[in-house]
Amino acid sequence: MIPYGRQRISKSDITAVVKAMKGEFLTTGPKVGEFESNLSEFVGAETIAVSSGTAALHCAYSALDLKLGDEVITPPLTFIATQATASMFGAKIRFADVQPDTGNLDPSKVEAVISDKTRAIVAVDYAGHPAELSELADLAARHNILLIEDAAHSMGSLYKGNHIGGIADITTFSFFPTKNMTTGEGGAVSSKNPKLLNRIREFSRQGLIRDKSRFEYENEGPWHQEVQNFGLNYRLPDVLCALGISQLNRIEEFKELRQKVFQEYFRNLGSINNLRLPTVREYVDPMWHLFPIRVPPNKRKSIFEALREAGIGVQVNYLPAHLHPVFTKQGYKRGNFPISEQFYDSEISLPMHASPELTNKRYHKKIAKILELHLGD
Ligand SMILES: *Cc1c(COP(=O)(O)O)cnc(C)c1O
């Protein structure tokens, strides 16, 4: 089975990890700062490495000091971690529907959901295609709230010529093996706001403060460190940072390979009836995490099964968040966000990763044949 997503590990990755394992520090050592500094340079904003994309989102919300009753606005078409981590602070999730072509948060649907309890707009770069960041940032600024970008799919993507990471108030990344680069498990949080960054760093390191100038205790002794707000352990170990450093060195190569796969899909599937391929806005340059196709909803299941039977490890991304039982028991139901629901009903994710096997002619012919068989009139 060809998986929908997969890591690309080289000898240099393995060498880097082994070297880190032979070193003095398995965690809290020099590889952490090196990875963070390389990430910061790449995305164009200071970046903190954490243990997963979920941890990164939890850290982002911690920086807002989210409290019971606060609200955050998210699209339904995302992985549930976008909502789960805000809900953990007692925040209420307000949904705004997505654009029918990109699957990204629709700015024109956001304003109606903003209230005096709203603390943040959370955009998700579905499939790696950046959301409408300018419009959303303007909206957030006008209402004096923050824009958070869940960029789990879009490490390496460009928006209006700028790398994802330095655009929203806070950006979060995931380095899970299917994502654009990997550390096994891992993630990162970027921001240009020092106050937010301080809180994020603290939250991800048990809330411990070591900066003397901020101590509430005076003259306790040279061992002293103190906690003023609770945090958790979301550190990324040196061993994984070493893998991250090595992977980040090759991200442009990964991007090119993914772009090639994207182009091959377009070339081979472009003329099939009743098949919708991804849209690309002219002001973005995505690093593709998914290749989402859309088919008539009544044929989705049979096409999905036929592809799986042929060894193509397709997926569906995503069951809209508001349709998970955790939200339906709060009263959400089908019909609430029709664009996300229609997107879900018709979506299949074809394999997308930086592997030469996905540019193979026979592979593409096989997929085209299955789709033609099911979609031809
Ligand atoms: C993968 C993903 C996450 C969570 O990242 P993990 O590293 O798996 O914790 C969050 N949001 C989106 C949109 C994702 O795809």
Image: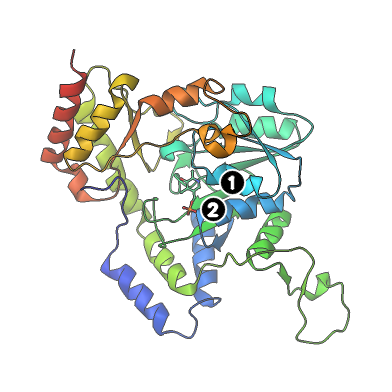
Position in image of residue 196 (x %, y %): 70, 54
Residue topped by disc 2: 54
Q: Residue at x 20, y 33 (%)?
A: 306
Are the two marked residues, 1 and 2, in contact with CB atoms closer than 8 angstroms?
yes
Mark 2 CB within 8 Å of ligand 1: yes
Extreme residue toward the left, this view: 362
Answer few, some or many: residues within 10 Å of disc 2's Cα (few below 14, many 20 plus, some between 14 and 19). many
Camera sees residue 9: yes
Vertical order, 16 against 259 (above or below): below
Which sits in the foreground, 46 or 302? Answer: 302
Q: Amino acid at mark 1?
A: Ala
Which sits in the foreground, 24 or 208? Answer: 208
Mark 2 residue element = helix
Q: Residue at x 65, y 45 (%)?
A: 87
Camera sees residue 191: no
Residue topped by disc 1: 84
Position in image of residue 352 (x %, y %): 30, 43
Q: Residue at x 73, y 47 (%)?
A: 66
Position in image of residue 321 (x %, y %): 52, 36
Q: Quadrant of residue 375?
A: top left
Left or right of 265, for residue 320: right
